[in-house]
Image (cartoon, rainbow, N blue to C red):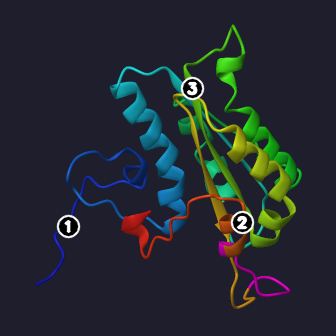
Amino acid sequence: MGSIPRIDATLDERFEARGAEPVLLTGIQALVRLPLLRRELDAAAGLDTAGFIAGYRGSPLGGYDKELAKQKARMDAARIVVRPGLNEDLAATAVWGSQMPGLRERAKHQGVFGIWYGKAPGVDRSGDAIRHANSAGVSTYGGVLALAGDDPTAKSSTITSGSEHFFIDLEIPMLDPSDIAEV
């Protein structure tokens, strides 16, 4: 049994497809689609939200920032600001700041969802900012997802690395998807 050709399929479909039809994505593309879906769900619920993504360019999440940049027009249209950080610490602090719209009288949106990304050594370095952000909490219609690029076999790093113990110490719940569908 062979595959059924889909003449109307496009590369943009991976970011735009809706419904029950399967979408073929890489893990990085799934992580790029994630904030777009969050914004879409918020809008469907009548919420005026926006997104903010900041992190450090580098392996093992090296392709994430590049794919976000490729999707700049799509992110802009969805009110998702992408600002790679000079380092993980500054990026974590910026994402923490995105959770404070309720503290300002003239906030532009009801809430901002944030995504922070970095390498495992950056989780360690950013521990203070992440710990304080976690302690402060998120806005009512906000929330933050931290993406840590671990390299347990030192494939793209000089030393082996993992973030599990740091997140446990920082009291951050962890998700460990086993495949792209779980992302």
Instruction: Give above or below for 108 relative to 158.
Output: above
User: Mark 3 = which residue?
Assistant: 111
Is 6 in front, or is 81?
Answer: 81
Vertical position of residue 68 compared to residue 178: above or below:
above
**Where, quadrant-wise, is the C terminus in this rendering?**
bottom left
| Residue farthest toward the left in the current orientation of the protein | 1
> What residue sits 49% from the left and 20% below the top?
48
Q: Is residue 21 left or right of residue 157?
A: left
Mark 2 — residue?
Answer: 169
In the rendered image, the vertical position of residue 158 relative to residue 177, given as above or below: below
Residue for point 65% across, 59% down: 171
Check residue 85 in the rendering and tell me which mark sits there, or answer none: none
- Chain-order first, disc 2 or disc 1: 1
Quadrant location of the N terminus? bottom left
Cα gap from disc 2 to disc 1, whole angstroms = 50 Å
Q: Is residue 96 above or below residue 34?
A: above
> What amino acid is labelled 1 in the image?
Pro
Q: Residues within 10 Å of mark 1 (few under 14, many from 20)?
A: few
- Segment colored magenta: 156-164
Q: Nearer the viewer, residue 101 or 119?
A: 101
Q: Which residue is mark 1?
A: 5
Front label number (2 vs 3): 2
First in sequence: mark 1 vs mark 3: 1
Give yes or no for residue 160 being in the magenta stretch: yes
Q: Tell which of 59 and 69 is nearer to you.
A: 59
Tell me the chief SS of the magenta region. Answer: loop
What is the secondary structure assignment of the residue under circle 1?
loop
